[in-house]
Every structure is written in structure tokens, then in C-alpha cells.
Image: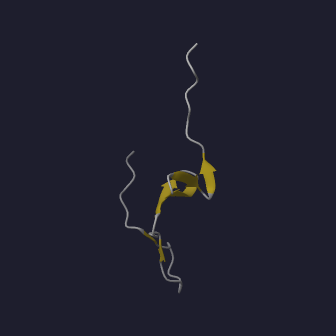
Amino acid sequence: MNAPLLPEILTRLTDEPQVPLPLAAEGVQRHVWHGRFGPILVEVAGGQVYVNGQRVEPFTPPAPG
């Protein structure tokens, strides 16, 4: 992955009167990834991963046989 390391503050591209949104919260890690199809919010809370607010199920490889 070659995404730039950004501070934990979501800043807007235009000058708006709204203050920057802090992404850090107690017990929750948040990262905004700017991909080809737009920004994606990735959150980790309590060992669970959420992408754009939807829980992501961990991958379980099929049993050999």
C-alpha cells in the first residue's frame, strides 16, 4: 500500500466555516482512505472492523478436503 500517512483530522478541500472533524476517539481507530471511487472511512472498534459504517466479516479460508 502506498497511500500517504495523514494526520488524524479530516480536512475539507474547500474553505468552509465548519471546523475540521477529529477522527480520533477513545477506543476507536479511524482512517479515511482516498481511493479511486472516493473517500472510504475505515473504523476499528472493539476488535471489529467497519467500512463506511458497515461491519466487515473476517475471511475464513475453506477447510481442506
Quarter of the figure that contains the C terminus = top right
Residue 39 left/right relative to 6: right
Q: Is residue 16 above or below residue 10?
A: below
Q: Is residue 57 above or below residue 42?
A: above
Work out which residue is located at the far top of the displayed protein and give it.
65
Residue visible at 37% across and 47% down in the picture: 2
Looking at the picture, tell me which residue is in the foreground, 61 or 36.
61
Q: Is residue 56 above or below residue 15?
A: above
Task: Identify the colour scheme used.
Answer: secondary structure
Residue visible at 57% across and 57% down in the picture: 38
Please state the horizontal and vertical placement of residue 35, each as a whole percent of the image: 51, 52
Work out which residue is located at the far right of the displayed protein and give it.
54
Work out which residue is located at the far bottom of the displayed protein and give it.
17
Work out which residue is located at the far front of the displayed protein and give it.
46
Please state the horizontal and vertical placement of residue 49, each as a whole percent of the image: 54, 51
Q: Quadrant of residue 60?
A: top right
Please state the horizontal and vertical placement of residue 34, each as a whole percent of the image: 49, 57
Residue 12 left/right relative to 7: right
Residue visible at 57% across and 21% down in the picture: 63
Q: Quadrant of residue 6?
A: bottom left
Looking at the picture, tell me which residue is in the foreground, 6 or 37.
6
Q: Is residue 62 above or below residue 12?
A: above
Q: How many marks?
A: 0
Residue visible at 53% across and 87% down in the picture: 17
Please state the horizontal and vertical placement of residue 57, each as a whole percent of the image: 60, 43
Quarter of the figure that contains the N terminus = top left
